């Protein structure tokens, strides 16, 4: 072969390597356990979560943003920026305010031709659906409770979607632990049962990914939006004598969250010691899928959770 051709070929190889990183995984599933504080997860009957944490890479000391509230925190998780930037300052569904104004991991993935899905248990996640960015948005609620869904319904809806859509990027949200924590206390038996229900749904999901034939090309990220702490329940300005769950503060119980990576290319049996902040989830998901991170991102990929910073197959 002529030297010029060899030089061109070498340059093309170099250019492909540098400018068009192949994906490290074909499918990324971000699973959020609402109010899934590390202490509660460690205490609950969650054999599937715990096995995935032990087999993969984990930290029990990742952090969410302040205020540690569901919609602002998940917006950081799924946009890669802090609340000062995304400005979702409210925590309920307010359609009049429109969707989030910064790009989401779903809109960025769509620009790269990837398929996206959100299987959620709360209506307020519609705030994160930019036009044309989510191929399947599923809130598997019932007519009796149209704005919420339980863990089993979420797991079953995921299984149905993953079989037909095989999304490249999918966010799954379990609201049960938060609902039980608020009502009965953050370490109550009811909260522990809610976490166990989520764990059963997690098994349904993991089995569905295997059944869809994409298990070997998938990464699961298991995390939470915030933790929680108990406060005296008040009624008409007086304590009732009962404790109930709350969150939103910068206290460790509220802001410490678990962060687990499990699946393709994940460093086995590893403890992540580098700091992980909730917006790093967005960066890690895009990095795994081979989508360039926008310069505007605050989050950085949690590279120490993976066997090699270089793409798999190199
Ligand atoms: Zn929450
Ligand atoms: Zn809550």
Image (cartoon, rainbow, N blue to C red):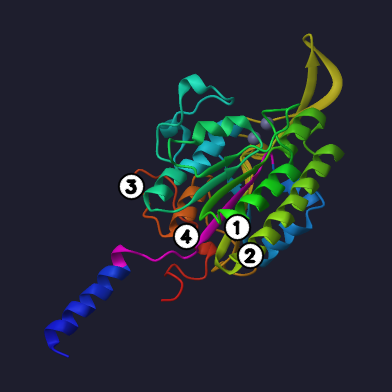
Query: Which residue lies under the disc numbered 2?
Result: 56
Query: Which residue lies under the disc numbered 4?
Result: 288
Is tag 1's residue or tag 4's residue first in the polypeptide sequence?
1
Spatial separation of the CA atoms under disc 3 and disc 4: 17 Å
Is tag 3's residue or tag 2's residue first in the polypeptide sequence?
2
Residue 295 is tagged as 3
Residue 17 appears left or right of 45: left
Q: Secondary structure at mark 4?
A: helix
Structural crowding at the residue carrying mark 2, measured as other residues with C-alpha within 10 Å and reported as few (<14), some (14–19) or many (≥20): many
Place of residue 170 in the rendered image (x, y in percent of width and height, measured from the top left): 55, 50
Nearer the observer: mark 1 or 3; the answer is 1
Q: Residue at x 44, y 67 (%)?
A: 309
Place residue 57 in its image quadrant: bottom right
Residue 37 in view, yes or no: no
Q: Residue at x 45, y 46 (%)?
A: 105
Place residue 21 in its image quadrant: bottom left
Query: Which residue lies under the disc numbered 1?
Result: 220
Toward the viewer: 216 or 77?
A: 216
Residue 173 appears left or right of 80: right
Residue 33 among those drawn in magenta? yes
Cβ atoms under marks 2 and 1 closer than 8 Å? yes
Is tag 1's residue or tag 3's residue first in the polypeptide sequence?
1
Toward the viewer: 196 or 143?
A: 143
Is tag 4's residue or tag 2's residue first in the polypeptide sequence?
2
Residue 86 in view, yes or no: yes
Structural crowding at the residue carrying mark 4, measured as other residues with C-alpha within 10 Å and reported as few (<14), some (14–19) or many (≥20): many
Quarter of the image containing the N terminus? Answer: bottom left
Cβ atoms under marks 4 and 2 closer than 8 Å? no
Q: Write the start and end of the magenta stretch as one range.
A: 18-35
Q: Residue at x 73, y 28 (%)?
A: 143
């Amino acid at each position: 072969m002529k030297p010029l051709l060899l030089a061109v070929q070498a340059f093309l190889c170099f250019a492909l390597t540098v400018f068009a990183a192949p994906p490290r995984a074909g499918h990324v599933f971000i699973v959020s356990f609402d109010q899934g504080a590390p202490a509660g997860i460690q205490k609950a009957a969650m054999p599937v979560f715990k096995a995935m944490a032990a087999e993969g890479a984990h930290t029990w000391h990742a952090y969410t943003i302040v205020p540690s509230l569901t919609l602002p925190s998940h917006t950081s998780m799924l946009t890669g920026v802090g609340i000062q930037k995304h400005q979702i300052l409210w925590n309920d569904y307010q359609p009049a305010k429109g969707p989030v104004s910064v790009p989401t991991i779903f809109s960025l993935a769509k620009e790269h031709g990837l398929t996206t899905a959100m299987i959620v248990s709360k209506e307020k996640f519609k705030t994160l659906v930019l036009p044309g960015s989510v191929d399947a948005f599923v809130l598997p609620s019932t007519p009796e409770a149209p704005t919420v869904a339980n863990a089993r319904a979420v797991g079953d809806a995921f299984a149905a979607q993953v079989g037909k859509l095989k999304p490249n990027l999918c966010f799954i949200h379990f609201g049960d632990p938060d609902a039980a924590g608020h009502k009965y206390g953050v370490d109550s038996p009811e909260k522990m049962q809610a976490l166990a229900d989520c764990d059963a749904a997690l098994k349904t999901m993991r089995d569905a990914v295997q059944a869809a034939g994409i298990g070997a090309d998938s990464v699961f990220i298991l995390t939470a939006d915030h933790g929680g702490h108990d406060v005296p329940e008040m009624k008409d300005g007086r304590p009732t004598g009962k404790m109930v769950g709350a969150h939103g503060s910068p206290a460790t119980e509220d802001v410490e969250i678990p962060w687990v990576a499990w699946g393709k290319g994940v460093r086995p049996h590893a403890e992540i010691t580098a700091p992980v902040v909730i917006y790093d989830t967005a960066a890690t998901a895009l990095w795994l899928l081979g989508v360039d991170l926008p310069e505007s991102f605050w989050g950085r990929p949690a590279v120490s959770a993976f066997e090699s910073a270089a793409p798999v197959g190199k």
